[in-house]
Image (tube, rainbow, N blue to C red):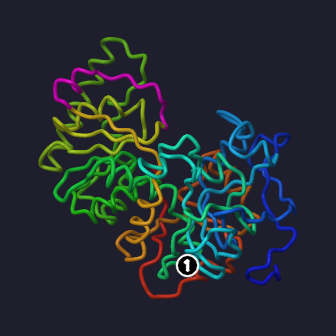
Amino acid sequence: MDAEIGDLPEKMAAWVIRPETEGEPNEAFQLEEIETPEPGAFEVIVRVMAAGVNFNNVWAALGQPVSVFGYGDHPEFGHHIGGSDASGIVWKVGDGVTRWKPGDEVVIHCNQASYEDVEVHGLDPMAAPSQRIWGYETTWGSFAQFTKVQAQQLLPKPKNLSWVDASSYGLTYFTAYRMLMTRGNIQAGDNVLIWGAAGGLGVFAVQLCKAAGANAVGIVSSPEKGELVKQLGAVDYIDRNEYAGMMRRGDETPEEEKERFGVTRAFAKRVKEILGDPPDIVFEHVGKATFPTSVFTVKPFGKVIICGATSGYELDFDVRYLWMKQKEIIGSHFANAYECMKANQLMAEGKIRPVLWQTMGFDGVPEAHQMLHENRHLGKIAIMVGAEDQTSGQEEDGPGAITAEVGA
C-alpha cells in the first residue's frame, strides 16, 4: 500500500463475510477489494497494523446464534468486516474530531454508542440504546487495511508494546477491568475467586487483583495453567478436575444433587484454606456449570460478578444461600471509554501485560477463526495487517506480551 497519511486509497483489502457465505469460518471469510470508507462527523479512519481474534467473529461467520446482518449498520452496507481488537495509525479524521490527528498511534476499544443518546452524557454509554460492539454488531472491523471507528474509541498505543502486542488485549482486558474495578469496586486486601483464571478473561483478572493489592485464587484445568496464573500474581490455584463433581448440569436427580453439593462444600472449604477467608468477589463467566458453586462459596454480603455464560445461560441455584447471606449478583458487559482509558494506562505502565499465544499473517484470518471454532487454539491469536513483524511498533523498552499457552 503506497497511500500517504491523510490520503485514503480508493480501494482496500478486507476479509469480508456476506449473507451468502455464512458457514464454516474458513469458507465464510472471503478476501475482497472493497471501497475504503470515509470518516463521518466525529469518526476516524485508522490504518490497521495488527488485529486481535475473538470468538465473536466465529459467531459472525456461522451466522449463529443469530446472523449479524439484521442489525447494527449491516443492512446499510450488506457486508460484515469483523475484528473487535486493533492497533494502528490514525489516517484521516472527520469533522469535529479535535483530539486526534493523522499519524497518531492508537489502540481501539470496541464500544460504540450514538453521541445523541442521553445515557452517554449522564449515566453510562453501556446503557445507551444504541450501544454496539464494533466489529461484531457493526461492520468496518479490524480485518482490513483500514477501519472506521468513532473518535471516542481511540486510546494512545502504549509505547512499550509492539503493534501485535497492543492489538491483543482490548476486548477481554477491558471487560475484566470493568468487572473488578467498577462493578466489583475491588479493594486492597479483598479475596477473589477467578474461574477460568488461565483463559482470555482470567489472565487479566489475576493481574488486576495483584495490581489492586487483592488476593486471587485461580481455578484452572491443569497444573501447568496453574503455574501460569501464579506467575501472573495469584496466591495459588485449584485444579477444577479435582472437584469435577461440583459442576452443575441442571438435570440432576435428588441423589446426584446431594452428591454434587457435597463436592461444592469441599471446594468452598479449599478456597477458604487458600485465601484465609471466603472470597469477597467471585469472577464469573462460566455460567450454568459453576454458578451454584459461586453463590454458595462467596462470603456473606459478597459479590458474584458475571459477564458471560460459556457453559449455558440458564442458571439453576439454591437461592437461599443468596438472600439469607445477603449476597449480590452483578451483571457486567465490556467497558466504557473512561474505563478503557484507565485500564490502558496500566498496560502502558507495565503493571498489566498482554498474554499472547500465536501471531499469524493477514492471510490467516479464516484459519484463525476456524481454529477457535474447532477449539484447536491454545490462547490469544493476533493478526499482522500492516505490521511487518511481531516486534515492529515498540518504541520504548519495557515488558511486552507474555507468550503462553492458556485456557480456562
Q: Which residues are magenta?
A: 310-326
Which residue lies at the image location 67% right of the left edge and 56% below the top edge? Answer: 368
Q: Is residue 316 magenta?
A: yes
| Left or right: 5 in relation to 324 | right
Q: Identify whether 347 is placed above or below 229.
A: below
| Left or right: 303 in relation to 39 | left
Amino acid residing under circle 1? Ser
Q: Is residue 275 magenta?
A: no
Q: Identify whether 95 is placed above or below 110.
A: below
**Residue 261 on image: x %, y %:** 26, 24
**Residue 280 on image: x %, y %:** 20, 45
Which residue lies at the image location 79% right of the left edge and 79% below the top edge? Answer: 7
Choose between 61 and 243: the one closer to the eye.
Answer: 61
Q: Secondary structure at mark 1?
A: loop
**Residue 204 on image: x %, y %:** 39, 59
Residue on which disc 1 sits: 162
Quadrant, the N terminus: bottom right
Choose between 114 and 369: the one closer to the eye.
Answer: 114
Q: Residue 24 sits in which quadrant?
A: top right
Q: Residue lying farthest left?
A: 276
| Left or right: 89 in relation to 173 | right
